[in-house]
Image (cartoon, rainbow, N blue to C red):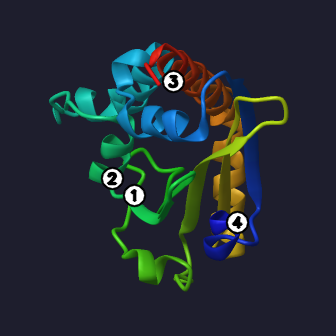
Amino acid sequence: MPLDEFLPEYHVNEIHSTRVAAPPDAVMAAVRSLNAGEVPVLVALMALRSLPALLRGRRRRPRRGTIIDGFLRGGFVTLAERPHELVVGAVGRFWRVSAEVRRVSAGDFAAFREPGYARAAFNMHAQSAPGGGTLLTTETRIEATDDNARRSFRRYWLLIYPGSAAIRRAWLRAIRRRAEGAKP
């Protein structure tokens, strides 16, 4: 699995899946084309995350595009893209208000070990399900580069995990709606 190629060991992870009444190609097309407006909980929680910057007078204009485009604009990189799987990752200090995402290339992601950071990666994987349709799974993995970063990230994760899980479940539902509504 491509996610294993980039983050085989991790300190924290979460996995969510849904069954979709559409073929894997249609599901991955929905993954790649879904926009944030189709996942209101994502918009709401990301607005909450950006509130401190807004209060400091750093106003961010909303951007158009897909959810994946938004991650890429925010410093994530595409680690692997295959017909039925997409893997995206970033290096940052996610527990800080600014997240301090550090732009690294896909080639440098797996080897990154600078202390004080965490590597985060997630995938969207579509596989044919027995009896028809597709099982769509997303897994998020995070590995800290040292003990201090691991402790900081774990405290942050305790706070944000419920929102993270809500976003992923809502994202999967929106992908399912889009894929099932698409014409074959």
Q: Residues within 10 Å of mark 1 (few under 14, many from 20)?
A: many
The residue lying at 76 percent from left, 71 percent from top is 9
Q: Secondary structure at mark 3?
A: helix
Query: Are the residues flagged by discs 2 and 3 in contact, CB closer than 8 Å?
Result: no
Residue placed most toward the observer, 44 or 140: 140
Residue placed most toward the observer, 84 or 142: 84
Percent coordinates x, y for residue 160 in the rendering: 63, 34
Does residue 163 appear in this view? yes
Percent coordinates x, y for residue 73 in the rendering: 27, 50
Q: Circle 1 sits on which residue?
A: 76
Above-or-below relation of 104 to 60: below
Query: Are the residues flagged by discs 4 and 3 in contact, CB closer than 8 Å?
Result: no
Instruction: Decide which of tag 2 and tag 3 comes sooner along the chain.
Output: 2
Q: Residues within 10 Å of mark 2 (few under 14, many from 20)?
A: some
Q: Residues within 10 Å of mark 3 (few under 14, many from 20)?
A: many
Q: Nearer the viewer, mark 4 or mark 3?
A: 3
- Badge 2 amino acid: Leu
Instruction: Decide which of tag 3 and tag 1 comes sooner along the chain.
Output: 1
Residue 1 is marked as: 4
Instruction: Decide which of tag 4 and tag 3 comes sooner along the chain.
Output: 4
Residue 72 is marked as: 2
Q: Nearer the viewer, mark 3 or mark 1?
A: 3
Q: Residue furthest right?
A: 130
Does residue 91 appear in this view? no
Q: How many marks on residues?
A: 4
Above-or-below relation of 77 to 130: below
Q: Nearer the viewer, mark 2 or mark 3?
A: 3
How far apart are labels 4 and 2 at the CA level?
21 Å
